[in-house]
């Protein structure tokens, strides 16, 4: 029984390796600056025609449906903002298209009432909202995903917001060379009237070369996400899942992965109030891995089904760096508590043996396309700040992000079962709970205000003012299609410029890694590498409180003080700092701190606090202020402070007013030289991984940092 599965697995692995070798390329431009993962080389509508969406109608000339139904290489731009209420499913059947939501003048675009389905190849979708809702759930054709698509190739979805799905929120899977990045998928509907009963699903993820990174999944009953093979890709499922934030799963959370090959790296799993209603093991879940069983495949019948080709095949998984802020044992040992303890032997035909445990666990990552990778803690901050349609973030995304940040549940469904799961909703109308004074005319869909579209005389998608500023001819429609030496058309340069700051800010502090853990040449600075280290309760090494005036963190930094103050944690990963006490950050050798980020709040309600001193610079009570609490509710503030002179060795700071509760982010530079060695030298200094975590014991193959220098263990 196992021999056949093993042989098939070996053949599949060989196929995977050959496929990996054909994907990676540095000779052609990526889809847009910041496009990463397996879908990063999607070309979309580059160099093609331009279609303008000029109204919010369901159909007709100038509508979004009309633009999607055009054929040929094309880019869809928007001359209007607002919500498009569809009257039927919109299926994108003609590919080679870029849908540039960031071009909408004003607050942006939302697609509502019916699903949007990707059913074509070579598609780029950016900065759009898809908020389905249950207004027409009685129509069985409306019981689908908010944004979905299967069995395609070359797809990238970037900075989109998806919510209120009848089935799954965001299920772009089962395709070749796809990326879903920087998206928010939240508040799927549980008891919405789906013909199959309760749902509330986040999404199905997978494919033959599929990347999912820097996404937020929040407030889902289950499938957060479902690692889901498709019939056409099940023998070649290669997926990279990193730097995602998963909050408040109420059921199975992340599970599946039958026969798949998956990296699960540096994700942030934050249990919420609905998660806390489940047993402890479920709260600790990273992924509940399984197989295609005899029952599922009809293996023991005369007519096995299409899944039988993967009968009893266990997948291969690289799992590392994932964080659960509630359970340190999961953070410290991803495999034991987050993976192995989640697997049922009886539920997998009693095939979960010691041999299976050993072979499914990989010591090195599976090959993946280049992705800017942060630590899980840093990804948490970046995702909450920049994910979704964040060029103009609406109040729905703000509510979800605030829930995630504060561990809250602003609204809950009213059906008997859902009402016991805080944060899980049955209808978009449940969001009215967050607005107790709302009138009868309240709508869950935010008002997206439009502005006048900038003048575009030749209709090439580029405003006249931008063409004038960039030496183009505003009366020549063909110059938008012109492709420059960098491989981008002039139209692409304009569209990319609109969101350049968001793309750069999101990736700040990360490291662009390619699939063999070697830096991508395009992002390897010659003068020094920038790394951001967090000093917070999440990176503190010892117990939650203590009397020691030396606080040690897991990234090599420590903090001392002249007041003998012991460590004490606050909310949201912050640490308490007493007013008037001089604190000193002890910086590891070889690092220079160039910028300090401070996020946090004043711990009292009877007076404001402020930063009084940083690295020898003194500040007044009006410079970097942390307002007093409103009752018992903290008022969070965030500041990024460039240092006049880089700090080496030590960095001092002092709070004033009342007690401050802060999370510090230290931007550092370090040398970039890499020394190649085959075995590590003993007692040659402390060793850290690329996320700044000190490594102890034997080292797995990979890149590490010691004494400010990178070295490779082979």
Image (cartoon, grey):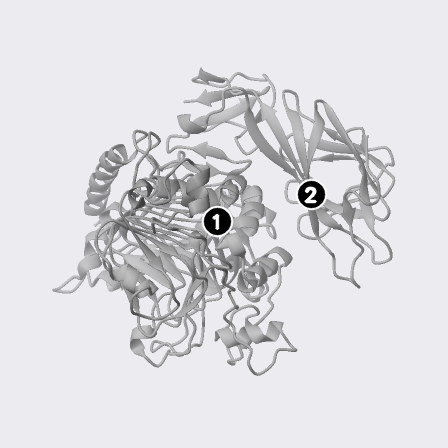
Q: Is residue 377 left or right of residue 476?
A: right
Q: Position of residue 65 (x, y in %)?
A: 30, 65
Q: Nearer the viewer, mark 1 or mark 2?
A: 2
The reply to whether residue 708 is visible in this rendering is yes
Q: Nearer the viewer, residue 310 or 18?
A: 18
Pick whichever, 540 or 398, lies toward us.
Answer: 398
Q: Which of the 4 image quarters holds residue 145? A: bottom left
Q: Tell which residue pokes out farthest to the front in this image.
A: 475
Q: Residue 244: which disc?
A: 1
Count every numbered label the image shows and give the total: 2
* Chain-order first, disc 1 or disc 2: 1
Query: Which of 157/648 is in front?
Result: 157
**Crowd band around label 2 with a 10 angstrom C-alpha radius: few (<14), some (14–19), many (20+):** some
Relative to residue 532, is residue 224 depicted above or below? below
Residue 25 rendering spot, x and y as whole percentages = 30, 31
Please name the residue shown 47% across and 46% down the image: 498
Q: What's the mark number on residue 639?
A: 2
In this rendering, the answer to whether 584 lies above or below 144 is above
Badge 1 density bin: few <14, some 14–19, many ≥20, Cα 10 Å: many
Residue 581 placement (x, y as % from top left): 86, 38
């Amino acid at each position: 029984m196992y021999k056949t599965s093993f042989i098939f697995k070996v053949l599949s692995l060989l196929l995977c390796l050959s496929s990996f070798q054909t994907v990676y390329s540095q000779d052609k431009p990526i889809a847009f600056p910041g496009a990463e993962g397996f879908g990063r080389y999607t070309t979309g509508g580059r160099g093609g025609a331009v279609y303008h969406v000029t109204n919010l109608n369901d159909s007709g000339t100038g509508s979004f449906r009309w633009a999607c139904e055009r054929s040929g290489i094309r880019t869809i731009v928007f001359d209007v903002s607002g919500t498009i209420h569809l009257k039927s499913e919109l299926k994108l059947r003609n590919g080679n298209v870029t849908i540039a939501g960031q071009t909408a003048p004003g607050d942006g675009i939302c697609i509502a009432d019916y699903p949007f389905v990707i059913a074509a190849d070579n598609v780029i979708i950016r900065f759009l909202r898809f908020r389905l809702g249950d207004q027409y759930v009685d129509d069985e054709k409306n019981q689908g995903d908010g944004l979905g698509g299967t069995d395609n190739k070359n797809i990238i979805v970037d900075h989109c917001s998806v919510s209120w799905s009848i089935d799954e929120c965001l299920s772009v899977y089962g395709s070749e060379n796809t990326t879903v990045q920087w998206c928010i998928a939240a508040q799927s509907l549980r008891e919405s009237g789906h013909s199959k009963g309760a749902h509330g699903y986040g999404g199905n993820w997978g494919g033959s070369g599929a990347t999912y990174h820097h996404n937020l999944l929040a407030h889902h009953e289950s499938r957060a996400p479902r690692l889901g093979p498709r019939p056409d890709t099940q023998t070649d499922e290669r997926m990279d899942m990193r730097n995602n934030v998963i909050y408040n799963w109420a059921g199975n959370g992340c599970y599946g992965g039958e026969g798949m090959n998956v990296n699960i790296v540096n994700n942030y799993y934050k249990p919420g109030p609905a998660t806390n209603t489940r047993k402890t093991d479920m709260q600790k879940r990273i992924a509940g891995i399984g197989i295609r069983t005899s029952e599922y495949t009809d293996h023991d019948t005369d007519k096995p089904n299409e899944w039988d080709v993967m009968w009893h095949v266990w997948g291969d998984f690289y799992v590392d760096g994932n964080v659960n802020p509630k359970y340190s044992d999961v953070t410290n040992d991803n495999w034991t508590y987050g993976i192995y303890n989640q697997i049922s032997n009886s539920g997998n035909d009693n095939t979960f043996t010691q041999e299976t445990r050993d072979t499914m666990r990989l010591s090195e990552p599976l090959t993946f396309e280049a992705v800017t990778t942060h630590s899980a803690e840093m990804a948490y901050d970046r995702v909450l700040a920049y994910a979704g349609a964040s060029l103009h973030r609406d109040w729905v995304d703000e509510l979800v992000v605030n829930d995630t940040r504060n561990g809250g549940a602003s609204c809950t469904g009213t059906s008997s079962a859902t009402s016991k799961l805080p944060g899980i909703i049955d209808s978009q109308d449940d969001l009215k709970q967050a607005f107790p004074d709302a009138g009868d005319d309240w709508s869950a869909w935010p008002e997206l205000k439009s502005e006048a579209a900038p003048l575009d005389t030749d209709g090439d998608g580029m405003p006249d003012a931008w063409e004038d500023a960039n030496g183009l001819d505003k009366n020549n429609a063909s110059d938008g299609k012109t492709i420059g030496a960098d491989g981008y058309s002039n139209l692409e340069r304009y569209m990319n410029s609109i969101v350049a700051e968001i793309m750069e800010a999101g990736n700040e502090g990360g490291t662009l890694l390619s699939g063999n853990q070697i830096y991508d040449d395009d992002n390897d600075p010659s003068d020094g590498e920038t790394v951001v280290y967090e000093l917070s309760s999440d990176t503190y090494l010892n117990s939650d409180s203590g009397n020691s005036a030396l606080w040690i963190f897991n990234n090599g930094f420590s903090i001392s003080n002249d007041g003998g103050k012991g460590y004490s944690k606050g909310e949201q990963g912050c640490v308490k700092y007493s007013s008037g006490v001089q604190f000193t950050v002890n910086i590891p050798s070889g690092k220079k701190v160039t910028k300090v980020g401070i996020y946090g709040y004043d711990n009292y309600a009877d007076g404001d606090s402020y930063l009084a001193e940083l690295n020898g610079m003194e500040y007044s009570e009006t410079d970097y202020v942390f307002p007093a609490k409103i009752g018992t509710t903290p008022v969070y503030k965030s500041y990024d402070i460039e240092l006049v002179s880089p700090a080496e060795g030590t960095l001092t700071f002092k709070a004033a007013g009342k007690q401050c509760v802060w999370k510090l982010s230290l931007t550092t530079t370090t040398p970039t030289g890499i020394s190649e060695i085959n075995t590590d030298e003993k007692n040659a200094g402390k060793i850290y991984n690329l996320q700044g975590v000190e490594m102890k014991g034997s080292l797995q193959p990979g890149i590490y940092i010691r004494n400010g220098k990178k070295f490779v263990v082979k």
